Amino acid sequence: VLFGTPEQVKAQLDALQSAWNIDEFIIDTPINDGAARLNSLRLLARAHLSAEVQP
């Protein structure tokens, strides 16, 4: 179970990827409210995309 700010979760995923050479993750957000679940995924996506475009 990972939790924290979007940047913290991304860092945790990056660490797991490096340690275990993981190609992809399945993200499960156990949030009942659909809009809140979508927002959670959007926040994580933004953290990932903003890190990808850094030179």
Image (cartoon, rainbow, N blue to C red):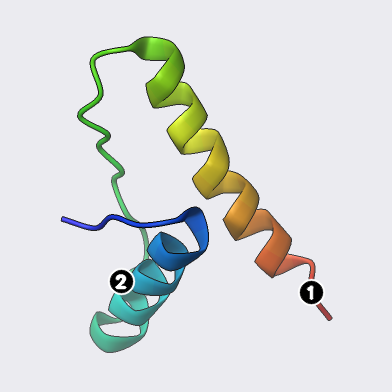
- Which residue type does callout 1 highlight? Gln
Residue pointed to by mark 1: 54
The reply to whether dot 1 and dot 2 touch (C-beta < 8 Å) is no
Give above or below for 43 relative to 1: above
Say what secondary structure mark 2 lies in.
Answer: loop
Q: Residue farthest to the front?
A: 5
**Which numbered disc covers residue 32?**
none
Quadrant of the rendered structure where residue 35 is?
Answer: top left
Q: Nearer the viewer, residue 11 or 23?
A: 11
Q: Earlier in the sequence, mark 1 or mark 2?
A: 2
Relative to 38, 29 lies left or right: left
Does residue 44 appear to the left or right of 17 in the view shown? right
Identify the image quadrant of the C terminus: bottom right
The residue depicted at 34 percent of the width and 71 percent of the height is: 12
Q: Position of residue 30 (x, y in %)?
A: 20, 29
Q: Residue at point 27% right, 87% down?
A: 19
Residue lying at the far bottom of the rendered structure: 19
Farthest residue, direction right = 55
**Which quarter of the picture shows residue 14?**
bottom left
Query: Callout 2: few (<14), some (14-19), or many (20+) C-alpha neighbours within 10 Å?
Result: few
Instruction: Give the residue drawn at x 71%, y 60%.
Output: 50
Q: Which residue is mark 2?
A: 22
Residue 52 sits in which quadrant? Answer: bottom right
x, y percent for residue 7: 51, 63
How dense is the environment of label 1, judged by Cα within 10 Å: few (below 14), some, or many (20 and up)? Answer: few
Give the amino acid type for the residue marked by disc 2 in the picture: Ile
Q: Quadrant of the N terminus?
A: bottom left
Q: CA distance from mark 1 to mark 2?
A: 22 Å
Comparing 28 with 7, the one in front is: 7
Nearer the camera: disc 1 or disc 2: 1
Q: Assign a secondary structure to mark 1.
A: loop
